[in-house]
Image (spheres, helix red, strand yellow):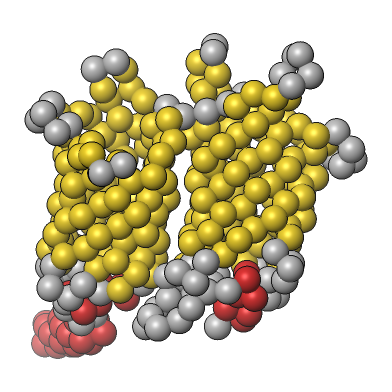
Amino acid sequence: MTRNIVGRVCLAALLLSLAGSAWAQEQPACTNARLAGSWSYTETGSVATPIGVLPAAAVGTYVFDAVGNFSGTQYSSAAGTVGKDEKFGTYTLNPDCTGTLDMMIYRDGTLTRHSVWAFVLDEKGAEMRGIIRSMALPNGTPLGPIMTMNARPVFLGGGRVCSLALGVGEWGYTKTGTLITPAGGVAYGAVGQLIFHGDGTISGSQDSSTGGAVSRNTLFGTMVLNPDCTGTATVDVYDESGTTWLRTAVMWLVLDDNAREVRGLVTTLTVPDQSGGTMNVPPVIVITARKSSANAGNGQ
């Protein structure tokens, strides 16, 4: 019996060793070539500053070369102050698919901050997850970031150009974030479906919650998509009947994951005021949309 037990233990150890070896062979070491190309990303979280903790978000694109350098463009919102940023930096990618991004961020040509991110690649190099390790102002004053990032290649393999035809179809989406009002931040969320038409128009519906007040909305709008897969959308939000205008959202968008995903940041939100005119509500809202399975092949 002792020999049988020993034999079984040895066999189990051998099988585990072979399985581990097979797994290792299926997981090739990460190299810079895996990261090289254009990626889009979403950042969400908050930043602790001398004036308080501010909600923050960004959507943008990175272009990585194969020798450790990258650049990027994003639209970001910190407590509702929205602007366009340019990023320049260096990266390291380790064989185990972890790495760092070290970047300088500029707005209108002026350095605004220095950030260092830690990241990991998963999905066989088709997805990046990251968190800010440090953030500082140009004078060296440290800030306290609680920001995470998710990113995907715009086109796996590169070499493709975007057009409105890639977006045509039904998309399910989620919007989450905060509205900055005179009374303070108000939580906002929405889930819905949009139809992108070939002529650049948009229609759809959603269920939304603003500070706990839930409503169903009808949506109409337009979209512009550039060859680099960035673009803008302007969406008018009505009540469920489609007769009473409630607000207009302007969004900056990026199409990624072989035209199966859209990321966006609300850059302007206009609502009616009590005098019969309109007013802007500063937003910190991001959008993530995926093409429905019925028409996902349009982006292949």
Up/down of 8 relative to 294, above or below? below
Q: Quadrant of the C terminus?
A: bottom right
Q: Is residue 103 visible?
A: yes
Say whether residue 67 is left or right of residue 84. left
- Name the quadrant containing residue 243: top right
Q: From the top left corner, tell me how far across and down residue 135 is, in percent.
A: 19, 37
Classify residue 114 by image quadrant: top left
Disc tally is 0
Q: Residue at x 79, y 19 (%)?
A: 276
- Answer with the quarter of the image where residue 76 lies: top left
- x%, y% of residue 260? 55, 70
Could you tell me which residue is drawn at 70 percent across and 64 percent down?
200
Please say if 3 is above or below 65: below
The residue located at (18%, 47%) in the rendering is 104
- Indicate whether 40 appears above or below 8: above
Side (left or right) of 114 relative to 260:
left
Answer left or right for 23 relative to 265: left
Residue furthest to the front: 109
- Residue 99 or residue 137, whichever sits in front: 137
At a point 70% along the width and 75% down the height, the residue shown is: 294
Residue 273 x %, y %: 72, 19
Residue 15 appears in the rendering? no
- Quarter of the rendering occupied by the N terminus: bottom left
Residue placed most toward the observer, 133 or 199: 199
Residue 26 drawn at (x, y percent):
26, 84
